[in-house]
């Protein structure tokens, strides 16, 4: 999703349910799978980092949190201190229904690929477009294989610039 599409969808999600918008922002910033985010406990979040213990690959991973993700976590923490984790009170079917309602009010309403999982792809795409190397993206997303992560490599138009730079810096 473009930044504009994301902003439009998040605005509609805010209208639907603020918690759904917060979860969506968190997913776009962390590349977490929805199940990983829904199972997060407060103990899994430390200043600037979070650890996903229950992952698809069955291997926990710790990632740094962007300022935007940290802001979401702080907002949720300020709103509700009693629950076990930031998003544990969100039932996935209700979130999906809210997502679909919000999406129906955007220009993406007829796009079958705009499902909540698109936020994971959005995160990966933005990392690739920002020049983050593919190995780091793999680790950040928790992909088991590099081939899974390579789907995003083509999105970085200048990802090979480092090769020319290395050759240019060589002395003859």
Image: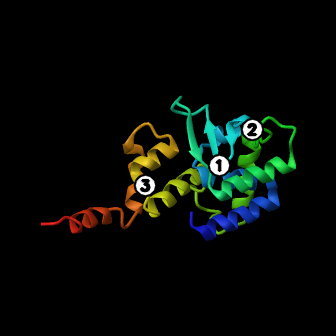
Element under label 1?
loop
Instruction: Please say if 104 is above or below 55.
Output: below
Residue situated in front as seen by the camera: 125 or 137: 137
At which x and y percent is residue 136?
Answer: 44, 48
Residue displayed at 75% across by 59% down: 13
At which x and y percent is residue 95?
Answer: 74, 47
Residue displayed at 75% across by 42% down: 87
Q: Is residue 98 visible?
A: no
Number of dots carrying numbers: 3
Give the quarter of the image for residue 41.
Answer: top right
In front: mark 3 or mark 1?
Answer: 1
At which x and y percent is residue 56?
Answer: 54, 33
17 with respect to 57 (left or right): right
Q: CA distance from mark 1 to mark 2?
A: 13 Å
For the N terminus, the quadrant is bottom right
First along the sequence among labels 2 and 3: 2
Residue displayed at 47% across by 63% down: 130
In front: mark 2 or mark 3?
Answer: 2
Q: CA distance from mark 3 to mark 1?
A: 25 Å
* Few, some or many residues within 10 Å of mark 2 (<14, 14–19, 20+): some
Element under label 3?
helix
In front: mark 1 or mark 2?
Answer: 1
Q: What residue did someone put label 2 on?
A: 42
Q: What residue did someone put label 1 on?
A: 48
Per the rendering, the mark at residue 152 is 3
41 with respect to 140 (left or right): right
């Amino acid at each position: 999703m473009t930044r504009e599409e994301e902003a439009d969808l998040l605005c509609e999600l805010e209208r639907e349910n603020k918690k759904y918008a917060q979860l969506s922002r968190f997913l776009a910033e962390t590349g977490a799978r929805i199940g990983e985010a829904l199972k997060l406990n407060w103990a899994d979040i430390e200043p600037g980092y979070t650890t996903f213990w229950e992952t698809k690959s069955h291997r926990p991973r710790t990632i740094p949190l962007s300022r935007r993700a940290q802001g979401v976590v702080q907002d949720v923490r300020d709103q509700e201190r009693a629950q076990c984790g930031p998003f544990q009170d969100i039932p996935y079917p209700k979130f999906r229904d809210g997502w679909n309602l919000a999406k129906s009010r955007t220009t993406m309403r007829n796009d079958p690929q705009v499902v909540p999982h698109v936020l994971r792809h959005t995160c990966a795409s933005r990392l690739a477009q920002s020049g983050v190397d593919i190995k780091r993206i793999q680790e950040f997303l928790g992909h088991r294989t590099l081939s899974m992560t390579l789907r995003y490599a083509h999105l970085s138009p200048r990802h090979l610039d480092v090769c020319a730079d290395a050759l240019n810096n060589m002395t003859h």
